[in-house]
Every structure is written in structure tokens, then in C-alpha cells.
Image (tube, grey):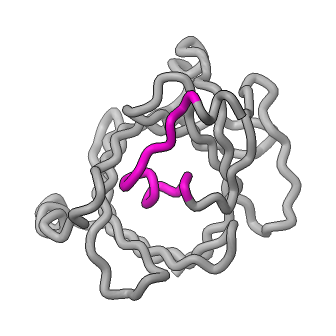
Amino acid sequence: MNIETEHKYIIKMPPQMLLSTLPSSKIEQTYITSDGGDNVTDRVRRREYDDRVVYTHTKKRRLSDMSHEEYEDEITAEEYGALLTRKCADTATLYKTRYLLTYMGQTFEIDVYSFWQHIAVMELEVKAESDAVALPPDIDVIREVTGERRFTNAALSRSVPDEREILAY
């Protein structure tokens, strides 16, 4: 078990020139039925790097707006396929490219989703909820959405907010 504490931001889509310089991976993320109760999300993920593919099964339980208990196991392609049969009927598989941006000793994850053209999500994992954050100056942050449930991946798999509404914020 791991405690994951993170800040989440909606950002304007970074220029392709910047993204092309960053390490990246392609992710397919699917939510599956869970036996952990209403406060637990259960998902499988296929993550493709340049030289390998990694499959994981993750269960998360919300502790606060910023923190979750996370149980994550690497699984085989066969186990991944079997777990996909438990896909939640009211969700869509999320397709995104994750870019890693290091700034002032912090590693930001920038998720570029297939359904948005002008915005992306940036996350930063911190050790404690009170940790200070230095945002990268090359990234145009629209606003912090930490704790806003409609921007969790589980919520995005059910309903995608219109990016025009977000950009008009």
C-alpha cells in the first residue's frame, strides 16, 4: 500500500515543440467493477514505453481531496485481458499520452487526452499536503483542480467536461 498525495491542474496544451523533448508513454486506462465499496476505484492500465509494455491493476481509496491509499500490482498481459472483462458498463477507456517534465527537482506528469485539443491535465505528487509547489514557467496553468471530482480519471471515463467551458473559466 502506498499513500498518493497530489496536486492536479488544468493547463493549456503545451506546444508540441516542448512535448517532443520530454520522456513519454502511451496509456490505456479502463475502470473495472470493484468489490471494495463505493469509496474504492478499481482500474487496469496498459502503459507503452519505447522499449516495453507494462500492465498494472490498481485500487484506490480516497482519504482526502489530495490523498489516496493506492494498491498497485504489475500484472501479465493475460491477467490484464481477463480483468478487462470486468469493465464498468458506464465508462469509456481513457487514451492519453503522459509526458514527464522536471522542474526545480519536481516531476510533473502532463496527461494529453485523446478527447481534448486545447487543454491537458498536469499532476504533481508531493510527500505531504502542505508541501510547497513551484510551477514550471513554460506551462500555462488555467487553474488548480485538486479535489474537483469531475477531473478525476474515473469521472472523465464517464463524462468529459467541454474544454470551451474550461478555457472560458
- Residue 36 lies, in percent from the top left, at 38, 87
Please give left or right for residue 126 compared with residue 133 in the image: left
The residue under the point 52% across, 57% down is 152
Foreground of the two, 49 or 119: 119
Is residue 169 part of the magenta span, yes or no?
no
Please give left or right for residue 12 compared with residue 25 in the image: right
162 w.r.t. 21: above or below: below
The residue under the point 48% across, 33% down is 112
Q: Residue furthest top?
A: 17
In which image quadrant can residue 125 be found? bottom right
- Residue 154 lies, in percent from the top left, at 43, 60
65 w.r.t. 29: above or below: below
Please give left or right for residue 25 compared with residue 132 in the image: left
- Residue 122 lies, in percent from the top left, at 62, 42
The residue under the point 32% across, 68% down is 57
Foreground of the two, 109 or 106: 109
What is the span of residues highlighted in magenta in the rendered image? 150-164
